Image: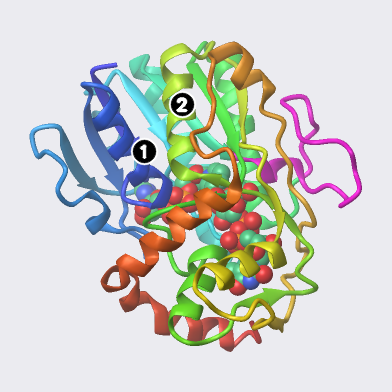
Amino acid sequence: MRRLLVTGGAGFIGANFVHHVLAHTDAEVTVLDKLTYAASRAALDGLPADRVRLVVGDVADAAVVEPLVAAHDTVVHFAAESHNDNSLDDPAPFVHTNLVGTFTLLEAVRRHDARLHHVSTDEVYGDLDLDDPKRFTEDTPYRPSSPYSATKAGSDHLVRAWVRSFGVRATISNCSNNHGPWQHVEKFIPRQVTNVLDGGRPKIYGDGLNVRDWIHTDDHSSAVLAILERGRIGETYLVGADGERNNLQVVRTILRHLGRDEDDIDFVTDRAGHDRRYAIESGKLRAELGWTPRFTDVESGLADTIDWYVAHEAWWRPQKAATEASYAAKGQ
Ligand code: NAD
Ligand code: DAU
């Protein structure tokens, strides 16, 4: 891997991955990003200009994608519309980017025989009951619930079909909920941390008992790099760090960390079709590739993330008021 193309590399997980790759490999990186509302040029500030460049463009635009893929040996595909709530308000951009974008990239990868890693989500498996002893594995059937997760499920199927039908050299990872630097304030953890920093209260959908399996984004980055370097072509790897917590537990950790009363919480209108629980069994990734997370307990990872938002108000402040106004209009 010498020349790496990272789609969506100005977004939350993509930008953290670019930092990780620069620190742990000698690859040169091109970021292809449309710079939607969720992107941040600032997340790429300060990186060495001789090793990173940003191309602003649409992953669904073959005229942009073809020459870029031709000039790189490896592609990591993060670009997506990523927020479930937005997909309930308007699914169209999710179909465009997550399905047409992945198709466009696959066609270019096929023509130029590049190595592809496709980044996906545990949400393709639907949800689990709170008392279900099972967790998701690579063999769990697909059962997506939202327009977002349905388009991600479709994109995974496209990748597998291109591997089998055309011999494309691709791997897939399905990761659980990430937290860390540079995540847009629309998402759960940045939203609640910044609400508390503003003197307000966390906003919990429904009863707050929904469970997510939290992982620090640095650990997602190291997993993707391990798969790129040592993963078997055609294989899928689930990425998770045994971080199941319900939403109430997470906001109570945030409130405690920021010195506020743990019951200072507002319960708001639930998300339509709200998945109850996600849980990842990551034994294949650990046994086959020797991957282990750096953050082995959720609370220490969360402390790192909360402190980052405390220290970076200038970064999140410009998005905060408009994001809250749009949630308030929906009773959330
Ligand atoms: P994000 O919304 O923060 O970033 C997505 C990036 O993609 C943005 O920079 C955006 O500008 C870019 N983008 C969107 N449409 C584009 C297009 N048409 N062409 C080029 N670029 C485009 O999302 P994220 O949370 O960083 O997620 C990145 C990937 O990881 C997604 O594929 C998502 O499904 C997957 N994932 C996310 C999580 C999570 O917890 N956030 C967990 C597992 C998997
Ligand atoms: O599981 C991986 C997925 O995690 C990724 O594929 C998605 O791209 C990513 O956005 C995330 O999806 P979720 O829907 O789980 O994340 P979100 O941050 O939107 O919400 C996390 C949980 O918190 C969920 O149960 C909904 C709840 N929630 C969310 C918000 C924004 C609240 O209770 N209040 C809120 O204000």
- List x then y, in percent, for residue 182: 37, 57
Residue 208 is left or right of residue 23, and the answer is: right
Instruction: Please give the label number shown on residue 187.
Output: none
Residue 88 visible in the picture: no
x 56%, y 30%: residue:
173
Q: Mark 1 or mark 2, which is nearer the start of the sequence? A: 1
The chief SS type of the magenta part is: loop
x 24%, y 31%: residue:
22
Above-or-below relation of 195 to 40: below
Q: Indicate the quadrant containing the N terminus: top left, top right, bottom left or bottom right.
A: top left
- List x then y, in percent, for residue 58: 34, 48
Query: Which residues are drawn in magenta?
Result: 121-143
Is ligand 1 less than 8 Å from the beta carbon at label 2? no
Above-or-below relation of 217 to 93: above
Find disc 1 in the rendering and name its residue.
Answer: 17
Residue 110 is left or right of residue 165, and the answer is: left
Q: Nearer the viewer, residue 247 or 79?
A: 247
Residue 257 is left or right of residue 244, and the answer is: left
Quadrant housing residue 104: top left
> Is-magenta flag for residue 157?
no
Find disc 2 in the rendering and name its residue.
Answer: 117
Q: Amino acid at mark 2?
A: His
Say few, some or many: other residues with alpha carbon within 10 Å of mark 1 (under 14 / 14 to 19 / 20 or more).
many
Q: How many marks?
A: 2
Q: Amino acid at mark 1?
A: Phe
- List x then y, in percent, for residue 301: 51, 49
